């Protein structure tokens, strides 16, 4: 048994000693059968949340209405979920009723795909009533039960199916795939935040090309923010070589394929409800990609972009064009040879300018700093305070004091 399971086994012992059942379930069991690295293990139990709280002294309610409790054991957090069934999905996304139950089989039955509906006991024995292990061997994504029904209950499962294609390089079983094409519109009912989680996992997965093709082929893309009606652009994305691209690069590439301008790109990313920090990073990646599509790197643009964005822009350029691109080492060389790498390395400061020119602070300070920065970068002026002063005195600049 893998180390994370071994480490969590005492929890199963403790729950069983209190007279309840407990098993490892979900993604960690699936991933261990696939010999993929596993991080956190999920535990399912017949004990009710209140019963778990009576067993373990350190717990936190993280989703108690769904039956999930966080148990801190030996300083490590573990998510333990009470067996449950769900019923009555009148809004295609949330069960009207969650009922705690004592039967493992019923709990496994409410899970999305057969590969995710396998339980493992503390000895490593599998409880696999839906033949999940076989599906894993055949690398197939199959819903537990009727696919139309299961996607109708919770439409997010459709996105999950496609993201597992990307992550695991599995195929979607025929009937399950047909169901995706029947009801992509049900995705309309799903909150953007939940779509985003699955879409980002899909973007960065090793079989992302295949998964993006499936989004087009099934019509699911029409119900994702900003992609509706852009099937051709999304298809173009699916035909790009996406191997080894980072998340921000993939977003930037997608936006580029759709052909959005900067303002539209910002709106698109906000519609997806991405965090502002990530939006900034993606827009910057896009900016430098578009710069690079039309220009070579100069000392000034290398300085402005910085190493990280130079590498991203070059990598994307290589996927989009037949232009000769530079290796990471070549780009680093250009950057490392710059006379200054950031404004803090400039010997001139805003305070120097204020004292030399006896002017009130204003935008002119930044304007001058930028001017000097550029001259230092191109080598026209040395990064020596006296030289900079002399150059400024000689060039008779008109101050913009407003
Ligand atoms: P990951 O490795 O990305 O965490 P996972 O399969 O563990 O994949 P989670 O979202 O962590 O996915 O969910 C844990 C388990 O809960 C799943 O394996 C599945 O059994 C069940 N599950 C999650 N989401 C759904 C859903 N929308 N419908 C039915 N079952 C679900
Ligand atoms: Mg998980």
Image: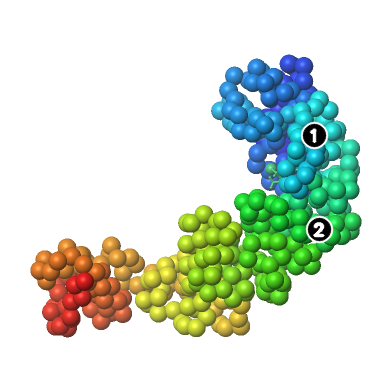
Residue drawn at (77%, 44%), measured in percent from left and top? 90
- Position of the N terminus, as image quadrant, is top right
Q: Is residue 326 visible?
A: no
Which of the pair 121/172 is nearer the observer? 172
Residue at which label 2 appears: 183
Ligand 2 lies in quarter: top right
Q: Is residue 376 left or right of residue 3?
A: left
Q: From what the image shows, is residue 278 above or below residue 353?
A: above
Q: Is residue 185 left or right of residue 344?
A: right
Q: What x and y, as percent, mark residue 201?
A: 66, 55
Residue at which label 1 appears: 85
Q: What x and y, as percent, mark residue 362?
A: 21, 67
- Residue density around tag 1, few if under 14, some if 14–19, many if 20 or more, within 10 Å: some
Is the residue under label 1 in contact with that under label 2 (CB below 8 Å)?
Answer: no
Residue drawn at (73%, 56%), measured in percent from left and top? 187
Q: Is residue 122 left or right of residue 275?
A: right
Q: Secondary structure at mark 2?
A: loop
Residue 202 in which image quadrant: bottom right
Which of the pair 237/205 is nearer the observer? 237
Q: Earlier in the sequence, mark 2 or mark 1?
A: 1
Q: What x and y, as percent, mark residue 244?
A: 62, 64
Q: What x and y, as percent, mark residue 397?
A: 18, 81
- Position of the C terminus, as image quadrant, is bottom left
Residue 182 in which image quadrant: bottom right
Residue drawn at (18%, 77%), measured in percent from left and top? 399
Q: Is residue 320 visible?
A: yes
Residue extending farthest to the front is 90
Distance from Cα at disc 2 to Cα at disc 1: 24 Å
- Residue density around tag 2, few if under 14, some if 14–19, many if 20 or more, within 10 Å: some
């Amino acid at each position: 048994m893998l180390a994370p399971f071994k480490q969590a086994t005492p929890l199963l012992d403790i729950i069983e000693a209190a007279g309840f059942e407990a098993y490892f379930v979900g993604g960690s069991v699936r991933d261990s059968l696939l010999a993929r690295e596993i991080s956190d293990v999920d535990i399912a139990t017949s004990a009710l949340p209140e019963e778990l709280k009576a067993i373990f002294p350190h717990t936190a309610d993280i989703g108690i209405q769904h039956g999930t409790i966080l148990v801190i054991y030996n300083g490590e957090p573990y998510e333990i979920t009470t067996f449950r069934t769900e019923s009555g999905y009148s809004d295609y996304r949330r069960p009207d009723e969650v009922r705690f139950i004592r039967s493992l089989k019923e709990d496994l039955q409410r899970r999305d795909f057969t590969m995710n509906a396998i339980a493992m006991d503390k000895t490593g024995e599998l409880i696999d009533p839906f033949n999940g292990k076989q599906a894993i061997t055949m690398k197939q994504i199959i819903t537990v039960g009727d696919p139309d029904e299961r996607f109708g209950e919770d439409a997010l499962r459709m996105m999950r199916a496609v993201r597992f294609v990307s992550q695991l390089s599995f195929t979607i079983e025929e009937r399950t795939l047909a169901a995706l094409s029947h009801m992509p519109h049900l995705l309309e009912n799903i909150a953007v935040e939940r779509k985003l989680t699955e879409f980002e996992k899909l973007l960065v997965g090793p079989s992302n090309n295949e998964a993006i093709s499936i989004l087009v082929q099934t019509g699911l893309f029409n119900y994702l923010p900003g992609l509706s009606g852009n099937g051709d652009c999304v298809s173009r994305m699916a035909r790009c070589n996406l191997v080894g691209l980072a998340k921000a690069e993939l977003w930037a590439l997608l936006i580029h394929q759709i052909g959005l301008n900067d303002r539209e790109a910002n709106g698109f990313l906000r519609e997806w409800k991405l965090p502002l920090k990530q939006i900034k990073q993606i827009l910057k990646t896009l900016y430098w990609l578009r710069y690079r599509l039309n220009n070579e790197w100069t000392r000034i643009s290398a300085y402005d972009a910085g190493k990280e964005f130079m590498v991203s822009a070059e990598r994307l350029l290589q996927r989009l064009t037949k232009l000769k691109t530079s290796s990471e080492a070549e780009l680093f060389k250009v950057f490392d040879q710059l006379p200054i790498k950031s404004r803090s390395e400039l010997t001139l400061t805003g305070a120097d300018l204020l004292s030399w020119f006896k002017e009130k602070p204003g935008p002119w300070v930044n304007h001058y700093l930028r001017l000097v920065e550029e001259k230092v970068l191109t080598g026209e002026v040395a990064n020596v305070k006296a030289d900079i002063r002399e150059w400024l005195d000689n060039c008779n600049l008109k101050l913009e004091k407003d």
